[in-house]
């Protein structure tokens, strides 16, 4: 099977394009655009109606995500990824608004999260500085998963993900990276199989 994976950050001067087959873009220069103020994002956040980001459990955090503080795309609050994910397994899905395969797999992730319940945290990581477009796409897809804004690619760097999208990162309950999967999921069962094999969680 051939996967359509879109390169990130390696074609200077090429701007984001929308639609399948047009996934190359210029490197981001910051976490978000200057235009993406809280006031500008507020109506988009209301329309997206995303689930709240996880809150710290009180379990000691370890692993490469500790200390990475990002904005929760749903409400603008800040979260330390290591702290909010500590104590239970997690699936981080790194995506961008312009990525065709991301559009296909995000609804499967939504369905999987509903099926898995509290067994595993599922969190999206928007890997482009255009936060407004990220919120708009999630609304378009009907995806209400909690997510964070990471236009500067801090999560990608921390986990050593390759230069493609989408990427799913499976995090063990102790905060260590169990597996980096640079491929789109094609079904809910695909996701469940990956979680079972790499995290030992039946879901």
Image (cartoon, rainbow, N blue to C red):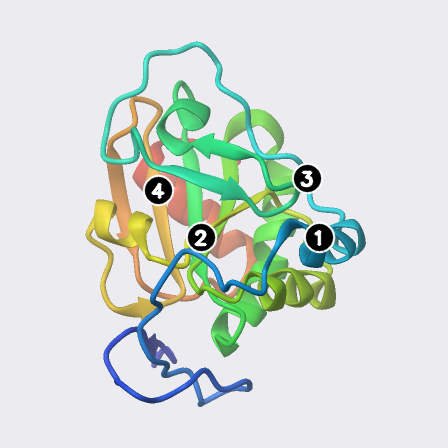
Q: Quadrant of residue 21?
A: bottom left
Q: Crowdedness of circle 2 by 10 Å Cα count: few (<14), some, many (20+)?
A: many
Q: Is residue 202 visible?
A: no
Rounded to the nearest whole Å, what is the CA distance between mark 3 and mark 4?
Answer: 20 Å
User: What numbered label is drawn on residue 39?
Assistant: 1
**Above/below status of 153 relative to 16:** above
Residue 174 in the image, given as x and y percentages of width and height: 29, 22
**SS category of the residue bearing label 2:** strand
**Contact flag, marks 3 and 2 (Cβ < 8 Å):** no
- The residue closer to the viewer here, 19 or 79, is 79
Image quarter in which the N terminus is found = bottom left
**Above/below status of 156 relative to 178:** below
Q: Which badge, 2 or 1, is on the more N-terminal residue? A: 1
Q: Crowdedness of circle 4 by 10 Å Cα count: few (<14), some, many (20+)?
A: many
Q: Crowdedness of circle 1 by 10 Å Cα count: few (<14), some, many (20+)?
A: few
Q: Which residue is mark 4?
A: 170
């Amino acid at each position: 099977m051939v996967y359509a994976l879109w390169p990130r950050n390696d074609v200077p001067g090429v701007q984001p394009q929308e639609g399948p087959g047009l996934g190359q873009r210029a490197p981001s220069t910051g976490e978000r655009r200057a235009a993406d103020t809280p006031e500008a994002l507020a109506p988009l956040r209301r329309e997206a109606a995303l689930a709240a980001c996880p809150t710290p459990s009180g379990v000691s955090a370890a692993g490469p995500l500790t200390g990475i503080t990002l904005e929760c795309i749903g409400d603008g609050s800040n979260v330390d990824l290591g702290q909010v994910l500590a104590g239970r397994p997690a699936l981080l899905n790194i995506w961008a608004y312009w990525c065709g395969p991301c559009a296909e797999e995000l609804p499967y992730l939504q369905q999987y999260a509903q099926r898995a319940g509290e067994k595993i945290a599922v969190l999206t990581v928007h890997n482009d500085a255009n936060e407004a477009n990220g919120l708009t796409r999630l609304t378009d897809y009907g995806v209400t998963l909690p997510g964070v804004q990471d236009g500067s690619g801090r999560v990608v760097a921390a986990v050593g993900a390759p230069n493609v999208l989408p990427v799913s990162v499976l995090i063990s309950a102790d905060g260590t990276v169990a597996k980096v999967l640079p491929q789109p999921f094609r079904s809910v069962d695909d996701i469940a199989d990956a979680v079972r094999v790499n995290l030992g969680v039946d879901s």
